[in-house]
Amino acid sequence: MRLLAFVLLAMLGALVPAAAVQAQQASECTLLDNPTRRFLINNQGTPFESWYVTEAVFVCDGGDRRIVAQTATYSVANGLITLNGDVQVDDPERSLRSEFAQYFTETEQLHARTGVVLREKSNGSVIRSELLDIYQETADRGSLLIATGGRPRAVMFQTTAGGMAAAAPGEVTETGVPRRRVPGMVRDSTVLEAQEIRMTGGQSFRGTGTALLRRDSLTATGHAIEFSDATRRLDVMGDAVVELPSQELRGDSITATVDDQDEIDEVLARGTASLVAEDLRVTARAIRLMFANGGVERLVAMGGQAPSGAAAGSRPHVESDGFSMDADSIDVLAPNQQISEAVAIGNALGERVLPDSLRARLPEATPEVLALLSRDWMRGDTVRARFAPNPRAEVDSTATATVMEQLAAHGDQAQSMYSVVDEGNPEARLSFNYLLSSYIEVNFIDGQVGTVSAAGDARGVYLQPSEAARATTGAVGVATPPGSQ
């Protein structure tokens, strides 16, 4: 996402007619001959002297710069150059097209209006807007470009090493510039749309007002979007949304850092944050994503105080089709984009969804009771879930990539309720075991409870489905409801 040097520098410097060369020794521009044009000098020799020319065609800097307009006016006193009608300014690096432009020679600022197109010739980068203000770098200020009017749009291209640009011979980009194949190079683009676009010093850009940014597979929207090449940081502010393949991240604000290879390194969403992925859903006050090899390898969901005046946010919650967690903070590890471990810390709750084969063993259960008993659950100061590759995923494309193999809790008054299968009678109904201890560990095999271990002063109760349902709701004084605080 590296920002390209895109500011129009000295595009109209020293633009004066050839007749002024003696008075303006700095001039390097020549007005080309044209017998059909009109050339007038008004108020000559007064403070109000100005020059007017029709069918204006100037060549500057030995022919490197060409300036064309239907009419051109130069005000001598204030150094103001006005170009009107089919304005074209070209040099070897850039081109400008508009219907109207003014250049202030003393302050070195350009104002172009109506159908403005500014293009970088070397790579096809382009800005389109109805109003474009360019402030060239001086001793007192850095360079600044401001595009407004008509929903400005910037398409910034860069060419990086690592492959070949995927373009057929003669293919043109959306900017209208032919795309060339360059062996060993890849052509990337960043598109920014907003009500206003600002580019500062060729090193940062900011879009404000319903801003949208697209870069490779990333799409970001927000009230404002800002990127700095110096800090390698992208900020999306105000109803922020960042979309990645199979992922959507939301927050009051989202910050992403980019490494030297222009790959996303970390993303942090703050303020009523949420993540919806292909097999994971997360809500928290803040969500931090860490990337490796082009995908998320770690996720941290954090709680905390809601901002002053804002509604209190819910505790961090992580949920998938097979498990869920609630806690003060949750840390999920996913090397190679597959969940291997999830740790919930602080008044934590972990749940495992029972496979359909086990829920079928509760035929008499009402939907309400079945909902209460459809999950094995565990509470404690810390709850840890470990996952293993799902063998079914190799033959069933609808199966989850991983399955829970262990659920453990520890802390003062750790609790667990899990389903028990009577191996001697496969047709028997499920029973449930409620356990209270300082450490509880349940291991699962083929979707069923395999082994259970506990440390400390362990106490347990063996329950039938109706009893387990009452215990889960707190109707029996042996279990704390999973959702209570």
Image: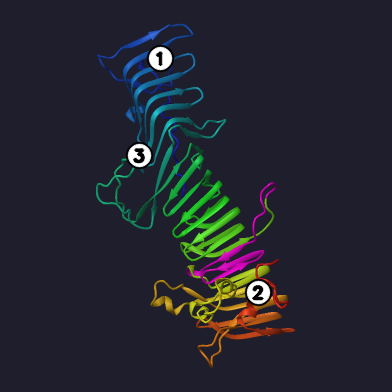
Circle 3 Cα neighbour tier, 10 Å, few/some/many (<14 / 14–19 / ≥20): some
- Picture residue at 64% right of the left edge, 64% below the top: 329
The residue under label 1 is 22
Looking at the image, residue 259 lies above or below residue 78: below
The secondary structure type at the circle numbered 2 is helix
Q: CA distance from mark 2 to mark 1?
A: 96 Å
Q: Residue at x 46, y 73 (%)?
A: 401
- Inspect the image, locate mark 3, and give the three-letter code of the amino acid beneath it: Lys
Q: Nearer the viewer, mark 3 or mark 2?
A: 2
| Residue nearest the observer in this picture, 456 or 257 | 456
Residue 311 in magenta stretch: yes
Magenta region = 307-336
Label 3 residue SS: loop
Coloring scheme used = rainbow
In percent of width and height, residue 60 lies at 36, 26
**Badge 2 is on which residue?**
472
| Amino acid type shown at disc 2 | Thr
Q: Given this view, does label 3 or label 1 mark the residue nearer the observer?
A: 3
* Mark linked to residue 121: 3
Judge whether residue 288 can be spotted in this image: yes
Compared with 40, 220 (above or below) is below
